[in-house]
Image (cartoon, rainbow, N blue to C red):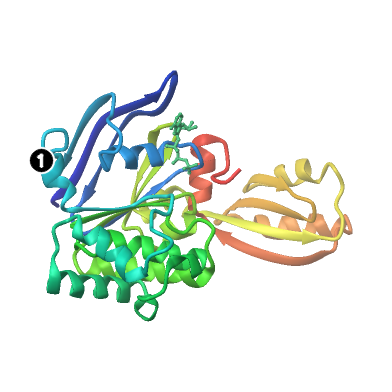
C-alpha cells in the first residue's frame, strides 16, 4: 500500500513541556486514519507540524514521498487543513469565504466558481451561500470551515476535532461527507477524542497519549484481545459496600466498577459467570431494575493501556 504520509520519530516541546515525544506513524493512500487521544495528548501539535504551522524539534516527515522540510510549498498545495479553531470571516458570505481560501491555491474564475459551489454543496450549505457566517449555528460554521479546506480538492485532508461542541445533525453530516470524500479518493486524517467517531469512520486508528503513539491498528485488531469479553451494566435499587469484593471473587469476573446506581462488571464470555452474578445479587435482595450489555470498545483498550479514561 502506498504511504501518503510518513512521520518518523518527531518531537516538539513548548519550553520544558514535551508535547510530542518520539511519535511515528503513517497514513496509507485512500484511507481514513483516526488519530485518537485525550485532551493534551499532542494531537493538535502534531497537526500543526503536519500543516507546517509549527516546526518539529526532531524527526522526519515525508508527505507524497517528499520531505516536508524541503518541499513545503509543493506539499501545501495538495493539503487541506481544518483547524480546531474555526477560521472563517464572520461578515462576508459563505460563498466569499470559500472563494477566498480557494483563490489562495490559485483557482480562478469558472473553475473557482464551480469548485466553491461543489464544496458548499458537499457540506450542505448550498442554500446558505449568500448568508454571512455570523448568522450560522456552530455546526454550520464548522461545515463552512470544512468547505474552505476542500474546495481546492486536496489529496490529503487533515481535520482537528471538527465535531467538538456541535449538534448531532451537523456531526452526522460531517461524518458522512468525510466518508464520501474518501470514496472519491481523498486520504483523511481525523483527530478526535470521541472514540465513537473513530469507530464509525476510521479504517485504521492511532491512539496517542502523552505525546506518543500507544497503539495502532484497525478497530478489529485493537479489539482482538477483548473478543472474549463482555461488560454487564446492572442497575440496582441498593447494594452493600462489600458487593464489589464478592462479585470479584466469582470465576470469570475480570473487573467490577461501582457507580451510584449501577455496577459495571467485566466478564469472560466463555464462563457461566452471569448466572452466579445474578444469584448473588438476588440472594442479597439488590433488586435488578435494568441490565445492559456492552462488547469490547476503544475505551477499554485505552483504559488498559493508560490506566485512565479517554474523557476524564
Ligand atoms: N502554544 C502552546 N504553548 C505551550 N504549551 C502548549 C501549547 N499548545 C499545546 N501545549 C501543551 O502541549 C501539550 C499537547 O497539547 P495539544 O493541544 O497538542 O494536545 P491535544 O491532544 O490536541 O489536546 P486537545 O484535544 O485538548 O486539543 C499539552 O500539555 C498542552 O498544554
Q: Is residue 24 visible?
A: yes
| Residue nearest the observer in this picture, 32 or 287 | 32
Against 91, residue 268 (above or below) is: above
Against 43, residue 16 (above or below) is: above
| Residue nearest the observer in this picture, 291 or 309 | 309
Residue 162: % across, % down:
42, 57
**To which quarter of the image does residue 177 belong?**
bottom left
Q: Which residue is mark 1?
A: 66
Say if disc 1 is inside 8 Å of ligand 1.
no
Q: What is the total number of numbered labels drawn onto the structure image?
A: 1
Q: Is residue 64 visible?
A: no
Tell me what residue is drawn at x 35 percent, y 58 percent.
202
Is label 1 in a helix, a strand or a loop? strand
Tell me what residue is drawn at x 38 percent, y 75 percent.
125
| Residue nearest the observer in this picture, 284 or 260 | 260
Residue 35: % across, % down:
37, 47
Q: In the displayed orientation, state which residue is furthest to the top.
A: 16
Image quadrant containing the C terminus = top right
**To which quarter of the image does residue 42 belong?**
top left
Instruction: Please give left or right for residue 137 compared with residue 235 in the image.
Output: left
Residue 141: % across, % down:
44, 64
Against 268, residue 245 (above or below) is: above
Amino acid at each position: 500500500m502506498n504511504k501518503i504520509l510518513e512521520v518518523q520519530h518527531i518531537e516538539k516541546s513548548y519550553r520544558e513541556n514535551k508535547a510530542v515525544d518520539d511519535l511515528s506513524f503513517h497514513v496509507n493512500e485512500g484511507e481514513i486514519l483516526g488519530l485518537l487521544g485525550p485532551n493534551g495528548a499532542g494531537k493538535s501539535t502534531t497537526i500543526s507540524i503536519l500543516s507546517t504551522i509549527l516546526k518539529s524539534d526532531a524527526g522526519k516527515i515525508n508527505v507524497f514521498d517528499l520531505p516536508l522540510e524541503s518541499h513545503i510549498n509543493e506539499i501545501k498545495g495538495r493539503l487541506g487543513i481544518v483547524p480546531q479553531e474555526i477560521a472563517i470571516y464572520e461578515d462576508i458570505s459563505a460563498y466569499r469565504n470559500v472563494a477566498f481560501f480557494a483563490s489562495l491555491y490559485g483557482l480562478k474564475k469558472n473553475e473557482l466558481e464551480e469548485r466553491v459551489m461543489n464544496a458548499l454543496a458537499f457540506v450542505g450549505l448550498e442554500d446558505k451561500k449568500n448568508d454571512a457566517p455570523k448568522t450560522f449555528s456552530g455546526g454550520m460554521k464548522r461545515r463552512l470551515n470544512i468547505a474552505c479546506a476542500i474546495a481546492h480538492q486536496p489529496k490529503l485532508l487533515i481535520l482537528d476535532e471538527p465535531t467538538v461542541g456541535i449538534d448531532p445533525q451537523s456531526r452526522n453530516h460531517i461524518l458522512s461527507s468525510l466518508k464520501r470524500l474518501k470514496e472519491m479518493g481523498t486520504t483523511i486524517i481525523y483527530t478526535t477524542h470521541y472514540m465513537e467517531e473513530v469507530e464509525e469512520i476510521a479504517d485504521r486508528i492511532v491512539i496517542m497519549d502523552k505525546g506518543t503513539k500507544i497503539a495502532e491498528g484497525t478497530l478489529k485488531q485493537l479489539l482482538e484481545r477483548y473478543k472474549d469479553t463482555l461488560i454487564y451494566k446492572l442497575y440496582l435499587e441498593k447494594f452493600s459496600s462489600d458487593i464489589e469484593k464478592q462479585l470479584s471473587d466469582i470465576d470469570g469476573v475480570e473487573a467490577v466498577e461501582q457507580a451510584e446506581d449501577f455496577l459495571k462488571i467485566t466478564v469472560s464470555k466463555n464462563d457461566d459467570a452471569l448466572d452466579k452474578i445474578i444469584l448473588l445479587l438476588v440472594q442479597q435482595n439488590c433488586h435488578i431494575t435494568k441490565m445492559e450489555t456492552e462488547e469490547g470498545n476503544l475505551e477499554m483498550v485505552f483504559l488498559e493501556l493508560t490506566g485512565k479514561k479517554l474523557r476524564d
